[in-house]
Amino acid sequence: MKIPSPTPCARRRIMTGALALALALGGIITAHAQHPIDIQRLSAEGDHFKALSLYELLPHRQFDTDTYVSAAKSAWALGLTKQATSLFDSVLRGDSLSLDDQARVTLSRGVIDFQEERFQEAALFAEKAAALLPEKSPLRGRALLLLGQSLLKVGAYATAEEKLLRSLADSIQSDRPEVVFALGSAQLKLGKLTDAEKSFKAVPTEDVRAPMAVRSLASIALQTSQSDRARFWFARGRSSYPEAFLDSWADYGVTKAALDAGDIGHARSVVEKAEKRFPPSDAWLILMRAALENAEWKGVTEGQKP
């Protein structure tokens, strides 16, 4: 789902103050940009600051629905989520939108709530957007995706899985990596490890969610005592996505997989390196030490070489 990224509160305050200053000076709008259509043009071109400034300067009686939507998108892109929310709400209160456009604006409104971590509100807007689209379509797929993601955040895992499966059936290729990752996350929470493994494997290797998908696949392999698979996924993760496998959990996973495979020497090497990188109080370091000590003691009592 292609949506503007959320921005920190500090940036919002800076942008709000800068916008107010620009309006006071009145010097950022060129002479030819004096018509509502210019708001739409500037917003489409990514010149969101000028688009929103022109929106504030021109008489609102000249504006149509497309102008308000463009202004809302520019406010959103600048991190001014309160203003974007207000503009989208004003558009939704009108009666000039087609069902598809109403669904698009409703979905945008829900995405803002999701970004602001108002997940229950996001779910309501997503459900409303999906209901406006009775026929199968990529837009309905995105609405169902947002609904599933929001339900996942509030712990409604079974319902989230249902919505995400419906989203997958509606989605176009470019949206599917996000859908299958969310679906795998719901299935993992539900303990459907085989289904979750299939979903995470469907995330393309170049996708931004791939590192977390590989971590999840490694976790599933550990949970199901598949030491060879676990070692494969940890090696794959550390080779392809090293920054996502630098934490103590990854070291614990490598240690556990090595011990499950009977490779105490490799496990000991991992623990020794981890002891230099993490504080003694680190929970995963404590667990990997305990696992190693248990394996070494078991080896001694069974007469094996340590």
Image: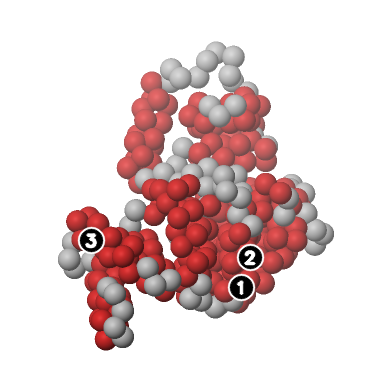
Mark closer to the chain start, 3 or 1: 1
Type of the residue with mark 1 = Thr
Mark closer to the chain start, 2 or 3: 2
Residue under label 2: 198
Give left or right: position of 105 versus 48: right
Residue under label 3: 272
Residue placed most toward the observer, 146 or 13: 146
Residue under the image location 51 percent in, 76 percent down: 224
Residue under the image location 19 percent in, 56 percent down: 276
Give left or right: position of 173 versus 25: right
Would you identify the image quadrant in which residue 2 lies?
top right
User: Residue 128 appears at what percent x and percent y?
Assistant: 67, 63
Residue under label 1: 194
Image quadrant where one finds the C terminus: bottom left
Type of the residue with mark 3 = Glu
Q: Is residue 244 visible?
A: yes
Residue lying farthest to the right in this orientation: 135
Type of the residue with mark 2 = Lys
Residue placed most toward the observer, 84 or 129: 129
